[in-house]
């Protein structure tokens, strides 16, 4: 009898079980990974944070009086830190600065400054022609008639040339200068350059910056010493007062650098006849801070001049340039002492337009001609003293020498002595009193004192905030 053997092999079920087991293991591993990457809660973050006190105030554990006290201490310290940080920030934003003075070591040679002088009287009476008197009537106050008494209605003169009038009728240095010495060497009127100012024709000693004269010693006798005759007999008689009427007698002097034009009607000082005036100078090199600490004008890197007509920027050059633009705009001409090649104003326009325009400009910081101080400036501090001259003996000698009487010598002669006190310069520099690095250092110190934190602590907090936002987002 045949035997029948039946074998049933279930391959599908046996294969399915390992696959299900492997899938279950994979899901358990993914779940563990997802659990490890889950964002921390505040208690977990506080227990691991380097911010002092946060773990005791917000960490895991029961709530009680101890935790409340720690939370109050943490909030109080945080408030104290924020108060101190706000004060430090306010102090930094005021941009405080300080001035540092540094006297330089003596130098064997120092560059002598430029010395500009002007006779206070602009026009010599004897040099005025009938045409000059006619054209300058509004400036001088003299009646517009010729020397024979003819009135203006019957006179006809050519158009005036203001440059010619000032050059011809101004006081001539060759006539005023009686003696001149610089550092023990004789000098003359040829060592002075003609310059025009609000006082008319003036003269500058040592004006060329390319060939500036050196001073090799300090003290009297080592600078410029000049004797001048101011020629009071040439001063204009006063018939009526005008804006140009002057009651003084003497000269105006300004000591300045060669790169700076004279602005003598505002920056000059007076020297009176009958006195020897001693002017002791000291070079001062000033360095100011630009914005945001100060308001100085930083130098331009351009090669061309920053102000047309001047080789370098200075407050005086800026003022003259601005005044010229204002007069040119309103009067359609410029005054003689102003830079440029435009038409010179005739005498009647001086009084009717130009002088009124200059008076209206003003010099304050809010005016149209406000000029910022350059960040690097050289100026000369002055100490002025004087003695009376001449004494009785020298008055008789000078009267015989210059064929004048003693009264004339006392009323017209003066001596000006300009010298360096010492061959040292004084450097004054503005410096920022509170820099950004100092602010960060103070903030770090306050942060460490009150809350024991650092930059890395702030990064921890930002990282936790990013985690929390990511967990609460749409994909969280």
Image: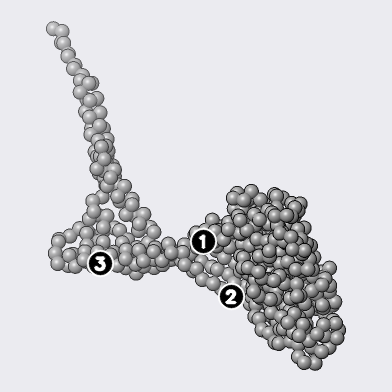
Colour scheme of the picture: one colour
**Where residue 85 sits in the image (x, y, percent)?**
36, 64
User: Which label's residue is closer to the chain start, 2 or 1?
Assistant: 2
Q: Which numbered marker is on residue 193? A: none
Answer yes or no: is residue 59 visible: yes
Residue at mark 1: 365
Answer few, some or many: residues within 10 Å of disc 2's Cα (few below 14, many 20 plus, some between 14 and 19): few
What distance separates the C-alpha of mark 1 from that of mark 3? 47 Å
Q: Nearer the viewer, residue 421 or 453?
A: 421
Residue 76 badge: 3
Circle nearer the viewer, 3 or 2:
2
Q: Quadrant of the N terminus?
A: top left
Query: Callout 1: few (<14), some (14-19), or many (20+) C-alpha neighbours within 10 Å?
Result: few
Marks 3 and 2: CB-CB under 8 Å? Answer: no
Q: Are marks 1 and 3 in contact (CB under 8 Å)?
A: no
Q: Which residue is mark 2?
A: 101
Give the label, 1 or 3, closer to the camera: 1
> Where residue 254 sits in the image (x, y, percent)?
68, 71
Q: Hey, which residue is sitting farthest bottom in the picture?
A: 393
Q: How many marks?
A: 3
Disc 2 is placed on an element classified as strand
**Picture coordinates of residue 241 (x, y %)?**
61, 68
């Amino acid at each position: 009898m045949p035997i029948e053997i039946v074998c049933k092999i279930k391959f599908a079920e046996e294969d399915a079980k390992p696959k299900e087991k492997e899938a279950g293991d994979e899901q358990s591993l993914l779940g563990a990974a997802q659990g490890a990457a889950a964002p921390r809660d505040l208690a977990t973050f506080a227990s691991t944070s380097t911010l002092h006190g946060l773990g005791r105030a917000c960490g895991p554990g029961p709530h009680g009086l101890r935790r409340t006290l720690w939370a109050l201490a943490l909030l109080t310290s945080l408030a104290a830190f924020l108060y101190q940080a706000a004060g430090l920030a306010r102090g930094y934003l005021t941009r405080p600065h300080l001035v540092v003075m540094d006297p330089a070591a003596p130098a064997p040679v120092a560059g002598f400054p430029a010395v500009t002088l002007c006779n206070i009287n602009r026009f010599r009476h004897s040099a005025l022609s009938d045409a000059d008197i006619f054209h300058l009537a509004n400036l001088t106050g003299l009646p517009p008639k010729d020397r024979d008494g003819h009135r203006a209605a019957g006179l006809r003169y050519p158009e005036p040339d203001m440059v010619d009038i000032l050059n011809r009728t101004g006081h001539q240095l060759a006539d005023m200068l009686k003696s001149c010495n610089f550092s023990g060497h004789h000098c003359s009127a040829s060592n002075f350059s003609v310059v025009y100012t609000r006082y008319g024709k003036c003269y500058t000693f040592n004006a060329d910056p390319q060939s500036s004269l050196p001073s090799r010693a300090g003290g009297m006798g080592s600078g410029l010493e000049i004797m001048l005759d101011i020629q009071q007999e040439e001063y204009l008689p006063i018939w009526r007062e005008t804006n140009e009427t002057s009651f003084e007698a003497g000269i105006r002097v300004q000591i300045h650098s060669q790169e700076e034009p004279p602005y003598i009607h505002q920056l000059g000082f007076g020297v009176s006849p009958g006195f020897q005036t001693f002017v002791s100078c000291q070079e001062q090199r000033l360095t100011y801070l630009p914005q945001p600490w100060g308001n100085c004008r930083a130098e331009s890197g351009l090669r061309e001049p920053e102000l047309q007509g001047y080789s370098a920027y200075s407050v005086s050059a800026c003022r003259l340039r601005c005044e010229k633009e204002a007069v040119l705009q309103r009067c359609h001409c410029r005054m003689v002492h102003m830079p440029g090649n435009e038409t010179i104003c005739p005498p009647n326009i001086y009084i009717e337009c130009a002088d009124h325009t200059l008076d209206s400009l003003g010099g304050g910081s809010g005016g149209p001609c406000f000029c910022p101080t350059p960040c690097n400036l050289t100026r000369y501090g002055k100490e002025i003293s004087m003695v009376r001259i001449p004494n009785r003996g020298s008055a008789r000698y000078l009267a015989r020498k210059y064929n004048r009487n003693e009264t004339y010598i006392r009323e017209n002669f003066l001596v000006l002595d300009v010298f360096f006190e010492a061959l040292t310069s004084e450097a004054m520099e503005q410096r920022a009193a509170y820099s950004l690095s100092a602010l960060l250092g103070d903030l770090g110190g306050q942060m460490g004192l009150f809350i024991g934190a650092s930059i890395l602590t702030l990064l921890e907090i930002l990282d936790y905030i990013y985690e929390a936002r990511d967990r609460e987002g749409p994909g969280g």
